[in-house]
Amino acid sequence: MTQPAQLTTLPNGLTIHLKEIHTAPIISTWVWYRVGSRNETPGKTGTSHWVEHMQFKGTQAFPAGILDREISRVGGVWNALTHLDWTTYFETMPAHLFDISLALEADRMVNSQFDPEEVERERTVIISEREGSENQPIFQLAEAVQEASFAQHPYQHEVIGLKEDLQTLSREDLYQHYRQYYQPANAVLAMAGDFKTQDMLAKIEAAYGPLPTGQPIQPHIEPDPPIGQEKRVQISGPGETSYVQIAYRAPSANNPDFFALTVLDSLLTGPSSLNMFGSGGTSNKTSRLYRALVEGEITVSCHGSLQATLDPYIYSINLTVHPAHTPETVLNAVDQEIKRILDAPVTNAEIDRAIKQAKALFAYSSENISNQAFWLGYAEMFASYDWFENYVEHLAGVTPEKVLQIAQTYLHPNNRVVGFYTPEQS
């Protein structure tokens, strides 16, 4: 019922990934652009996210509001997301109505209008979104830790951008960004579902083949120097709860170390999901930090976050402090568990369980048609589709010795930023 993925490229540079899945009369269409907050310069943070918002403001062929009603009316869903390295748009539709997706995405790749009045309306929306996030202690802490984790790399800023930049970005800033990056040679069209590959390819060529292309200017980003020594970030604000975030500089997804760190993450905190649109999940109750800190009533919760990125990013351990303890106590408890990994060999049984949990989460995140279409394009943003196809094999090759080496290399105090959020004293 499922065919192997078919990969091709149009003369104008558009990469196409198609996968026939005949389990349900559904087609999921994703268009991925190699542009995210990584592509922004100082003073222009938040541009990629704002451009994504403007893509829903309509074109002459598809005025704003009409498609939302039409897609909802037939039971379809559509949305978009901007991240560090990429921006993506998707529609999951009944198979006989997929033409809407092709026509829409081809049209707004080149014909979005960026009406000045709509730009100003969206400025208010995005600044309000940012201010809402600022009310959350976890956002405040994460932003401070992220900024401290990088000296100059654009990864130091949240995707939504700095408030001072959101107040000054112009319509021309947004439109130039759109024109530079939204073009066939900088995009991947990924589709999975109930179709015949050759028929679909002909339809795609008719919709996208005439679109002009250029040479996207992908910035040369200098890698940041090593963190070098532990940094501390202290945030205070309203509330009654303290939080701890420990961020270690982590390898890029294309680095072989990434897979061993994935297993170490599963061992320590439970596996991180790489698919933001995935379904299902696995419990982290067998992880070392959960058993030592949550069951030991030192923290209320703990989870890890490892993201697949184009450049080295951060692996973070996020903890909610138990009322009876302090952030310093939590940090010491985490360090004790990391020391256990460094001092005593991790058993094959533990590694096997960690790998099985990571594999299970990966399977959950790949199980339906929308998720299959997601992976067709997502892996291309930081590696290639082969990365996805060989993911499980890479995990299976991780050994206890490799986990120890990864822990020694990456989970060192000189490779981290530690952030504490504590309630303000009245």
Image (cartoon, helix red, strand yellow):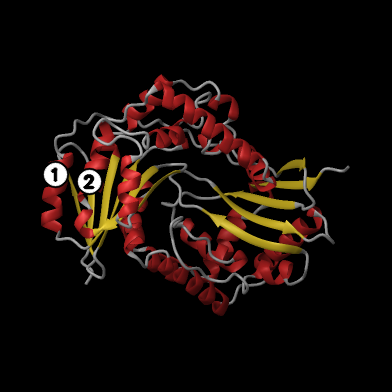
Query: Does residue 177 sit above or below 285 in this rendering?
Result: above
Is residue 70 visible in this depiction of the protein? yes
- Disc 1 or 2, which lies upstream in sequence? 2
Who's the residue at 59% across and 58% down the image?
A: 304
Q: Dot 2, crowdedness within 10 Å: few (<14), some or many (≥20)?
A: many
Query: Does residue 217 sit above or below 402 in this rendering?
Result: above
- On residue 102, which mark appears? 2
Find residue 75 and report its horizontal and vertical position in percent. 33, 57
Find residue 248 and report its horizontal and vertical position in percent. 61, 50
Q: To which quarter of the image does residue 290 belong?
A: bottom right
User: Hey, what amino acid is under mark 2?
Assistant: Leu
> Which quarter of the image is occupied by the C terminus?
top right
Secondary structure state at the residue bearing disc 2: helix
The answer for how far apart the CA atoms under marks 1 and 2 are is 10 Å
Who's the residue at 21% across and 72% down the image?
A: 1
Q: To which quarter of the image does residue 33 belong?
A: top left
Q: Which residue is mark 1?
A: 205
Towards the viewer: 130 or 315: 130
Find residue 217 and report its horizontal and vertical position in percent. 33, 29
Residue situated furthest bottom in the rendering: 349
Secondary structure state at the residue bearing disc 1: helix
